[in-house]
Image (tube, rainbow, N blue to C red):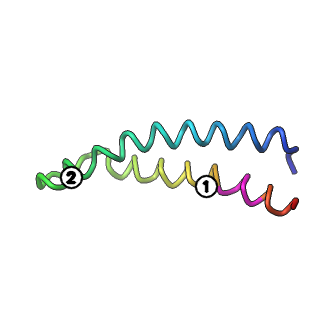
Amino acid sequence: MPGRREQVAELFAARRHLGRVGTNLNQAPRALNSGARPAELDAVLAATHRAVQRVQDPTDQLLQQI
């Protein structure tokens, strides 16, 4: 199991990643409302799922240590 420092570093990296993914994801509703389906929508949704897991996994590990 990684140490606390590594877990915190992973959480900060995941947070930055979520910010970038969120920017892309925020553009999807505008395209969907216009009747289009962005070609990259599936990739953005998959990246969002990966980013959430990057936050969830170390968070679960930290909670197990409490």
Q: Is residue 36 left or right of residue 38?
A: left
From the viewer's side, name the closer residue of 27 and 37. 27
- Magenta segment includes 57: yes
Place of residue 46 in the rendered image (x, y in percent of width and height, measured from the top left)? 45, 52
Amino acid type at circle 2 is Arg
| Quadrant of the rendered image containing residue 33 | bottom left
Give the residue drawn at x 48%, y 47%: 47
Place of residue 34 in the rendered image (x, y in percent of width and height, measured from the top left)? 11, 52
Tag 2 secondary structure: loop
Residue 53 is marked as 1
Majority SS type along the magenta span:
helix
Residue 38 is marked as none
Give the residue drawn at x 19%, y 54%: 32
Q: Residue furthest left?
A: 34
Instruction: Tell me which numbered mark, 1 or 2, is placed earlier along the sequence.
Output: 2
Amino acid type at circle 1 is Gln
Place of residue 6 in the rendered image (x, y in percent of width and height, measured from the top left)? 80, 39
- Magenta segment includes 18: no
Labels 1 & 2 near each other (Cβ < 8 A): no
In whole angstroms, how far apart are the C-alphas of marks 1 and 2? 25 Å
Give the residue drawn at x 64%, y 36%: 13
Segment tinted magenta in the rendering: 56-60
Residue 37 is marked as 2
Q: Is residue 55 left or right of residue 62?
A: left
Place of residue 11 in the rendered image (x, y in percent of width and height, measured from the top left)? 68, 43
Tag 1 secondary structure: helix
